Image (cartoon, grey):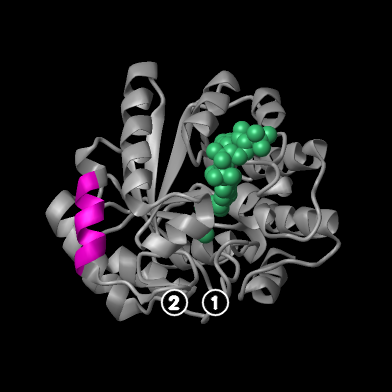
């Protein structure tokens, strides 16, 4: 069995987009650089969305241009539509992420498009990426429960997942956007997706709203998933999904994986310093569930 787990840090996007107030571009750049220095090789640096919809993500163009991608690292950015894709391409981003929500209402609330239109745009962006040599990741949001439509059936998610993979997405990220999934559901869904498609192009994105984030990571690992989104200090939420709390904390996922014998390549003391750095920038201390214990170990 593969004993390496890839952690994709989404704090600079999912984490910051839901904070009151905006960090400067210089602060956002320092945050991403500190994450790189802590050994994170996969980082979502921001999004190319409307600055009116999400002012926290304004200027991702300049941020992307200012950042150097070290060898072997993958800096990605979220794009909601073709305009976002084109901005990302101009800014030199090598990997873009498109988001399809599994329900009609969530697509409307998030990006003002129907589910059909979102799927069409996702396919167009995947095809464009192939022409232009960009990697395209597809997110399937509210894959377990939608804040507007309630529980989402596994059959719907399975069908959309197959369509996105067949369209040629380089990675499919199953996202529990509001943190409503439990480990039994995760095992059922991810087990069936791994069986159908293999695990190489699958990842999971969990929020910790009900304190089940880490348990869900474990359930997905047991199902064969080896790639997870996480956010330093557990930053996050979603301005368009009421009730969503922060992502599962990167330091907690690193701890879980390393204690079970998996390698993440992430340096814990440096990562804890990044938690302090971002807490200082936001003026609010951040930290995952094991923060105090991890701090005492690092001391
Ligand atoms: N980047 C910047 N501006 C964009 C844009 C993009 N990717 N896409 C559209 N716009 C601009 C348009 O140019 C237009 O500008 P104008 O008012 O100055 O003419 C304005 O936004 C409205 O364009 P329209 O195509 O009608 O978009 P909309 O109002 O239906 O909004 C989105 C659609 C996707 C741009 C907007 O809902 C959005 O940015 N959502 C972000 C969602 C998000 O980040 N969710 C969290 C992650 S899942
Ligand atoms: Zn999220």
**Magenta highlight: main SS:** helix
Q: Where is residue 270 drawn, in percent x and y?
A: 68, 51
Lateral position of residue 131 relative to residue 296, left or right: left
Q: Residues within 10 Å of mark 2 (few under 14, many from 20)?
A: many
On the image, the x and y values in percent for residue 164 come to 26, 45
Looking at this view, is 155 or 172 the one in front? Answer: 155
Label 1, secondary structure: give it: loop
Task: Quadrant for residue 292, please give it.
Answer: bottom right
The disc placed on residue 112 is none
Q: Is residue 274 magenta?
A: no
Residue at figure coordinates x 70%, y 45% from the top left: 52
- What separation in Å lies between label 1 and label 2 (alpha carbons)? 7 Å
Q: Identify the mark at residue 209; answer none if there is no mark.
A: 1
Horizontal side, residue 66 vs residue 188: left or right: right
Q: Are marks 1 and 2 in contact (CB under 8 Å)?
A: yes
Depth check, front residue: 211 or 91: 91
Asked if the beta carbon under badge 1 is closer than 8 A to the nearest atom of ligand 2, the reply is no
Range of the magenta residues? 155-163
**Disc 2 on helix, strand or loop?**
loop
In the picture shown, does residue 91 fall above or below 59? above
Which mark, by number, is residue 180?
2
């Amino acid at each position: 069995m593969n004993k390496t787990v890839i952690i994709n840090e989404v704090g600079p996007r999912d984490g910051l987009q839901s904070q009151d107030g905006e960090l400067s571009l210089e602060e956002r750049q320092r945050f991403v650089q500190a994450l790189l220095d802590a050994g994170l090789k996969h980082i979502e640096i921001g999004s190319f969305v409307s600055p009116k919809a999400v002012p926290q993500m304004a200027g991702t163009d300049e941020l992307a241009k200012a950042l150097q991608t070290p060898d072997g690292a993958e800096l990605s950015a979220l794009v909601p539509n073709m305009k976002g894709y084109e901005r990302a391409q101009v800014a030199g981003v090598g990997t873009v992420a498109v988001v399809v929500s599994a329900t009609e209402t969530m697509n409307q609330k998030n990006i003002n498009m129907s589910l059909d239109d979102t799927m069409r745009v996702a396919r167009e962006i995947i095809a464009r990426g192939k022409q232009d040599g960009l990697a395209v990741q597809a997110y399937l949001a509210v894959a377990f429960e939608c804040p507007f439509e309630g529980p989402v059936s596994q059959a719907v998610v399975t069908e959309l997942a197959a369509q996105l993979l067949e369209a040629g997405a380089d990675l499919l990220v199953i996202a529990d956007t509001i943190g409503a999934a439990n480990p039994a559901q995760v095992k059922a869904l991810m087990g069936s997706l791994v069986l159908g498609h293999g695990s190489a192009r699958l990842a999971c994105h969990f929020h910790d709203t009900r304190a089940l984030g880490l348990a869900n990571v474990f359930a997905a690992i047991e199902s064969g998933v080896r790639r997870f989104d996480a956010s330093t200090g557990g930053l996050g939420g979603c301005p368009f999904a009421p009730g969503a709390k922060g992502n599962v904390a990167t330091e907690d996922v690193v701890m879980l994986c390393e204690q079970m014998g998996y390698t993440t390549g992430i340096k814990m003391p440096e990562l804890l310093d990044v938690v302090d750095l971002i807490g200082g920038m936001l003026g609010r201390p951040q930290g995952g569930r094991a923060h105090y214990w991890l701090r005492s170990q690092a001391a």
